[in-house]
Image (tube, helix red, strand yellow):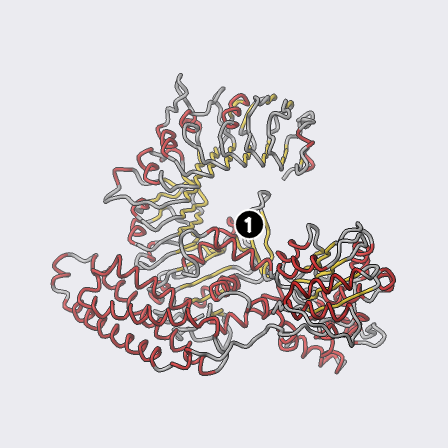
């Protein structure tokens, strides 16, 4: 991943060139030369990264590249930090700061020294212009099936699965059908396929059964040739040129046979799926193609209903272990049974891991030996998971770094999708704009390869991800190898954090934070400090701590990412010199966001959890040009216009939560051209009052006329509004043309006002939480809600809902938490993809 390190460095250098070049003064010339050398090296790596060698010489070169790249980064960031501190001094101190000129000269010398080293690396390694090919994990020829599956006699829990697959193969239509089996490496896809392939029912039904192990190489001519040879007599010779002729020959031989079954094992590409269906003749004989694949997109291209192979559960895992260890398949020693169940649980239901560890347990069946094997579990099963490398190695270097970064979170942790992509951006792993599309494509690729488990919202959008437990442990080895981050554990042999290559990102569990900080040493090279809890801790019960937070910026002055979860920090004031921060997520009893935050010129995301009822924002957030995400767990008070200084250049896309009384239209207007998500929470009764012309008496809502990009809006009242009638202010609907999602809670509008919501042209999701509307009858008008796809209604008053086929014609999900609703409109229940949840027993 040296090319990724250089990419990040070049981006940082360009940032200095464009925004901070005045700070480096007379060192500018050497800086420009350094930038040129780094650009040359980056281009060289981009040309050769697909052919990286596993030779020790190449690894040594890559390590040197990283060291010099990090040195350049450290020199620049440290100098910029010193210059920024210097700007805060009075004019006399600046004039007589002779040490600053010395630092500039040292900076120039540092640039020069690093440039020479970078130049040497590029010029002294010409052999890498033709590097040794990377260790090839792809299979150049189709594999023999005996090498690719667990022994059929050992299978446990596959009888039901095999019967389902056999039923789909034997039954179905007379047309050609493809049945894919999909799942992660080691689940037993090939084993199941082999069990099905050799079943007596299959051999009786299909006159020609052909097995081909495709592998990652996807060499279609080799695969087609194996199919052709399997369709004819072994001594027959063929002369053909290209795939089309091969396909025609296969078709001609298969046509003569009654019914054909082809098993394509370990398929990686959709092209093979697309082509394979063409060489089977359309002769109404019910030919079948059974596919095994670890890629979900390949399975989806083959069939709308792929067979998803799942992990073994509970007792089945131990049964498979018993079968592999004992000849009679049963353990009689109670102590070994308990140890065996413990070992089986570590395999996380992965059959391949169970079979491999069983071989080790079979050698010696004493309690002592099994305890030793349990203690050194990963030493025994690590080799079994080597096939995972094929999935991992198929990723680009950028995708590898993004995937491995997921392992910075604790094992089993559900990682919020939006949090992850903002961290990827802050770390420089993906470009800052646009981020969602690329990040989603990356996660889809990880899911396709079964490297992560993705959970989605009811809308289908990615909500959270997590790594499979057994892959998590295996891939941690890659994290260490690639120096993605360093995990810290307070053990007697506590690891050093002084290596500028391996210790740039640190991860520690919150239970160890206090002890770590008390013994912390200065490490200026550290760029990320991540502290998560391994257990779910409620936000209201966060651990109180005497953590001396001031030691973190003192030890890590060049931090870019700071996350401290599950521990309440007493104050934010000690963070005032972390000028390089890009991402901060922190919890504590905070009353304000200090003004010095607006000096953090690179800050992109601020996430604050406070135990106070509100948070007073004193920082000039409108002047922070890179700040895109501000999320507070309690209503925040925005700075008034009179406190703002300087030219505003806001890029805020997310603003959550803000109190309504501080929504001054001049203030909110600063984000009108960029804001996509806005959440307003508090006592909003006064804000919703309108005059006789339905214009809001609260000037903050007039700002909505300026929001051209707003896609997600929440209006949440902490207490139910008590006025008799509330109407939507005209400003809410005069120009919210891009609004896709609207959430209302305790706003107490009358149901007649819902018609105005129905006329929002892009509204797809409408969540009417408790007491959003008042009244017992809702009768929408014709042509309302033409774009609405998801509707949630939580209302104890609603009794009659008079909707018809003229409303909600695109609705696909309906969630009702209305215990007094007499009935769901009959015409709504006819939508094919609609989900209906109603009544108090189904409260969500």
Q: Which residue is mark 1?
A: 462
* Residue 342 visible in this rendered orientation of the protein: no
What is the x, y in percent for residue 671? 35, 40
Query: The N terminus appears in which quarter of the rendering?
Result: bottom left
Pick the front one: 409 or 36: 36
The residue positioned 43% from the left and 39% from the top of the image is 678
Pick the front one: 182 or 462: 182
The residue positioned 47% from the left and 22% from the top of the image is 726
Residue 579 left/right relative to 480: left
What is the x, y in percent for residue 821? 66, 26
Q: How many residues crowd mark 1 within 10 Å: few (<14), some (14–19), many (20+)?
A: some
Residue 690 left/right relative to 758: left
* Residue 277 visible in this rendered orientation of the protein: yes
The residue positioned 36% from the left and 33% from the top of the image is 706
* Residue 634 higher or lower than 168, as above or below: above
Helix, strand or loop for disc 1: strand
State which quadrant residue 690 falls in.
top left
What is the x, y in percent for residue 582? 37, 56
């Amino acid at each position: 991943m040296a090319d990724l390190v250089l990419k990040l460095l070049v981006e940082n250098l360009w940032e200095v060139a464009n925004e901070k070049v005045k700070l480096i003064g007379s060192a500018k010339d050497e800086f420009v030369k350094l930038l040129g050398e780094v650009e040359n090296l980056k281009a060289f790596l981009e040309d050769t990264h697909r052919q990286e060698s596993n030779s020790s010489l190449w690894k040594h070169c890559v390590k040197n590249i990283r060291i010099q790249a990090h040195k350049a980064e450290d020199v620049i960031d440290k100098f910029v930090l010193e210059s920024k501190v210097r700007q805060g001094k009075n004019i006399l101190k600046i004039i007589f700061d002779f040490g600053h000129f010395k630092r500039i000269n040292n900076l120039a010398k540092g640039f020069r020294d690093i440039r020479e080293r970078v130049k040497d690396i590029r010029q002294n390694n010409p052999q890498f212009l033709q590097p040794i090919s990377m260790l090839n994990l792809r299979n150049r020829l189709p594999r023999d099936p005996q090498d690719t599956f667990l022994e059929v006699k050992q299978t446990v829990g596959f009888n039901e699965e095999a019967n389902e697959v056999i039923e789909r193969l034997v039954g179905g239509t007379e047309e050609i059908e493809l049945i894919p089996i999909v799942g992660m490496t080691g689940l037993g896809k090939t084993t199941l396929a082999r069990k099905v392939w050799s079943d007596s029912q299959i051999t009786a039904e299909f006159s020609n059964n052909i097995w081909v192990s495709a592998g990652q190489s996807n060499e279609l001519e080799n695969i087609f040739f194996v199919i052709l040879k399997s369709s004819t007599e072994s001594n027959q010779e063929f002369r053909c040129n290209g795939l089309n002729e091969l396909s025609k020959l296969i078709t001609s031989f298969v046509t003569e046979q009654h019914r054909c079954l082809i098993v394509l094992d370990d398929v990686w590409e959709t092209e093979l799926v697309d082509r394979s269906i063409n060489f089977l003749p359309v002769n109404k004989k019910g030919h079948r193609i059974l596919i095994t694949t670890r890629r979900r997109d390949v399975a989806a291209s083959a069939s709308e209903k792929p067979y998803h192979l799942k992990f073994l559960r509970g007792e089945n895992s131990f049964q498979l272990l018993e079968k592999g260890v004992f000849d009679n398949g049963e353990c009689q020693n109670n102590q070994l049974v308990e140890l065996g169940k413990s070992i089986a649980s570590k395999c996380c239901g992965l059959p391949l891991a169970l079979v491999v560890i069983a071989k080790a347990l079979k050698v010696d069946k004493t309690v002592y030996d099994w305890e030793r094997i349990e203690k050194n579990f990963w030493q025994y099963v690590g080799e079994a998971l080597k096939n995972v490398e094929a999935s991992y190695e198929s990723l680009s270097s950028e995708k590898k770094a993004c995937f491995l970064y997921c392992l910075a979170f604790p094992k089993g942790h559900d990682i919020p999708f939006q949090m992850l992509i903002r961290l990827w951006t802050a770390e420089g792993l993906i470009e800052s704009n646009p981020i969602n599309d690329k990040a989603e494509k990356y996660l889809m690729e990880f899911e396709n390869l079964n490297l992560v488990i993705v959970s989605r919202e009811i809308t289908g959008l990615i909500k959270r991800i997590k790594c499979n437990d057994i892959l998590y442990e295996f891939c941690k080895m890659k994290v260490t190898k690639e120096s993605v981050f360093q995990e810290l554990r307070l053990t007697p042999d506590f690891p050093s954090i002084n290596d500028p290559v391996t210790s740039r990102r640190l991860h520690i569990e919150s239970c160890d934070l206090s002890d770590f900080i008390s013994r912390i040493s200065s490490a200026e090279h550290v760029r990320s400090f991540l502290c998560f809890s391994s257990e779910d801790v409620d936000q209201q019960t966060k651990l109180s701590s005497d953590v001396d937070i001031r030691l973190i910026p003192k030890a890590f002055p060049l931090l870019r990412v700071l996350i401290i979860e599950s521990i309440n920090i007493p104050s934010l004031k000690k963070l005032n010199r972390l000028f390089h921060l890009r991402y901060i997520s922190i919890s504590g009893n905070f009353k304000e966001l200090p003004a010095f935050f607006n000096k953090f010129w690179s800050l992109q995301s601020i996430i604050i959890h406070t135990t106070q009822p509100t948070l007073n924002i004193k920082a000039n957030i409108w002047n922070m040009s890179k700040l895109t995400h501000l999320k507070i767990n309690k209503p925040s008070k925005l700075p008034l216009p009179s406190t703002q200084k300087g030219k505003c250049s806001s890029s805020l896309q997310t603003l959550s939560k803000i109190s309504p009384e501080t929504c001054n239209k001049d203030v909110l207007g600063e984000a009108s051209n960029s804001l996509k998500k806005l959440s307003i929470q508090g006592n909003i009764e006064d804000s919703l009052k309108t005059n006789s012309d339905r214009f809001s008496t609260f000037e903050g809502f007039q700002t909505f006329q300026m929001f051209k990009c707003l896609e997600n809006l929440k209006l949440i009242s902490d207490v139910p509004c008590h006025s008799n009638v509330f109407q939507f202010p005209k400003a809410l609907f005069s120009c919210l043309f891009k609004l896709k999602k609207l959430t209302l809670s305790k706003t107490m509008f009358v149901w007649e006002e819902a018609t105005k919501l129905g006329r929002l042209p892009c509204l797809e999701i409408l969540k009417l939480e408790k007491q959003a509307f008042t009244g017992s009858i809702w009768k929408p008008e014709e042509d309302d809600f033409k774009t609405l796809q998801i509707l949630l209604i939580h209302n104890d008053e609603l009794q009659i809902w008079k909707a018809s086929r003229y409303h909600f014609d695109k609705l696909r999900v309906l969630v009702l938490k209305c215990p007094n609703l007499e009935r769901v409109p009959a015409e709504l229940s006819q939508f094919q993809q609609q989900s209906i949840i109603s009544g108090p027993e189904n409260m969500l």
